[in-house]
Image (spheres, grey):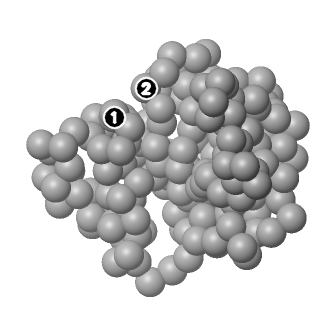
Amino acid sequence: MAEHIFLTGEIQVGKTTIIERILSGIDFVPGGFCTVAGGASSDHSIDHIFIIPFGESLDESAGIPPVADRYRNERVIVNYPEIFDTVGVRILKDSDGARLIVMDELGFMESEAEAFQSEVMRLLDGETPIIGVVKRRDTPFLDRVRAHENVTVIEIRRDNRDEIFEKLKDWCDV
C-alpha cells in the first residue's frame, strides 16, 4: 500500500504553500484537486468556493458550479454536496493512473457528499501516493481519513513548517 501524507494545522499557517513548494520540484503532472475561492458576488457579500483539478486555474475550469457559498455578513457557509458527488468524483476518477494525487483540501463541506467520500476512501486504499490537507475539525469522514492505516497526518505550525518541507520535499519523487 502507498503512504499518504496529510498536513493539518491552523488557518493560513502554510499547509498549501508547503504542498506547492514540494510539487514545484516534480517533472510530472499530479492528479487530484484543490479547493479555491473566487467569483464573489457583485456586492462582495458572497464568496463562491470551487473544487477544480489540481494545477488548473479557476478560469480554466470556468462553468464548474461552486461546492459552497460563504456569506460574509452572516458568517454562514452553504454547502452543495451534489457538486462534490459529481464534479469532485469526476476529478478523482480522472486521477486514476496518476503518479501522485493531491487532495487540497478535505474539510467539513464534504460531510454529506457520500459518493465523494467513497471515492476518497477508495484512493486511500490504493497504490497511488496522496499528499493533501485535512482540516482539524472532527467529522466522521475526516476522522476516517485521519485514522486510515495508510495515512500519516503531520501538524504544521509556523515554527516547524520549513523543517517539515525539508523532510517531505523528496517524498513525492515517485
The crowd level at tag 1 (other Cα within 10 Å; few <14, some 14-19, many 20+) is some
Is residue 144 positioned above or below 39 on the image?
above
Q: Tag 2 or tag 1, which sits nearer the N-term?
A: 1
Q: Is residue 117 left or right of residue 163?
A: right
Q: Is residue 59 visible?
A: yes
Which residue is depicted at the point 34% across and 66% down? 22
Q: Quadrant of residue 94?
A: bottom right
Q: How far across and down, in percent of the image, does residue 148 sit?
A: 50, 28
Is residue 144 positioned above or below 93 on the image?
above
Quarter of the figure that contains the C terminus: bottom left
Kind of element beneath mark 2: loop
Q: Quadrant of residue 18?
A: bottom left
Which residue is depicted at the point 27% across and 66% down? 170
> Which amino acid type is marked by label 2?
Arg
Q: Which residue is mark 2?
A: 136
Residue 9 is labelled as 1
Q: Is residue 4 left or right of residue 46?
A: left
